[in-house]
């Protein structure tokens, strides 16, 4: 099982972590994780990260 937070990269780009957020390509990372999980028949979940750390 792969679980990722539903992180908005546009909101994170306005914080102190802007350079690392924009360099990392969050959307592409989630897309690749989803693709690989489906290929390996692993469950992929995207959860709301409002109350998580």
Image (cartoon, rainbow, N blue to C red):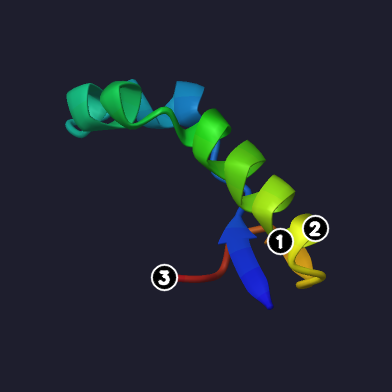
Q: Earlier in the sequence, mark 1 or mark 3?
A: 1
Look at the numbered disc 3 and give the secondary structure of its residue. loop
Instruction: From this view, report whether residue 53 is shown above or below residue 33.
Output: below
Q: Nearer the viewer, mark 2 or mark 3?
A: 2
Give the residue at mark 2. 38
Image quadrant in which the C terminus is located: bottom left
Percent position of residue 31, x then y? 65, 38
Neighbourhood count class around disc 3 (C-alpha, 10 Å): few under 14, some 14–19, many 20 upward: few
**Residue at point 47%, 29% (across, down):** 9
**Residue at point 42%, 28% (across, down):** 25
Neighbourhood count class around disc 2 (C-alpha, 10 Å): few under 14, some 14–19, many 20 upward: few
Question: From where the camera sits, is residue 49 visible?
Answer: no
Give the residue at mark 1. 37
Q: Quadrant of residue 15?
A: top left
Neighbourhood count class around disc 1 (C-alpha, 10 Å): few under 14, some 14–19, many 20 upward: some
The reply, left or right, for residue 19 in relation to residue 23 is left
**Residue at point 22%, 31% (across, down):** 20
Q: CA distance from mark 2 to mark 1?
A: 4 Å
**Residue at point 60%, 51% (across, down):** 33
Looking at this rendering, what residue extends furthest in the bottom direction?
1
Which disc, if any, is residue 23? none
Confirm or deny contact between disc 1 and disc 3 (CB under 8 A). Answer: no
Confirm or deny contact between disc 2 and disc 1 (CB under 8 A). Answer: yes
Question: From where the camera sits, is residue 34 visible?
Answer: yes
Q: Nearer the viewer, mark 1 or mark 3?
A: 1
Looking at this rendering, what residue extends furthest in the front direction?
39
The reply, left or right, for residue 41 in relation to residue 18 is right
Which disc, if any, is residue 53? 3
Instruction: From this view, report whether residue 19 is shown above or below residue 53.
Output: above
Image quadrant in which the N terminus is located: bottom right
Q: Quadrant of residue 50?
A: bottom right
Look at the numbered disc 1 and give the secondary structure of its residue. helix
């Amino acid at each position: 099982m792969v679980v990722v937070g539903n992180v908005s990269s546009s909101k994170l780009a306005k914080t102190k972590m802007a350079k690392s957020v924009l360099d990392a390509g969050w959307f592409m990372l989630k897309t690749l994780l989803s693709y690989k999980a489906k290929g390996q028949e692993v469950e992929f979940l995207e959860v709301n990260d409002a109350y998580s750390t």
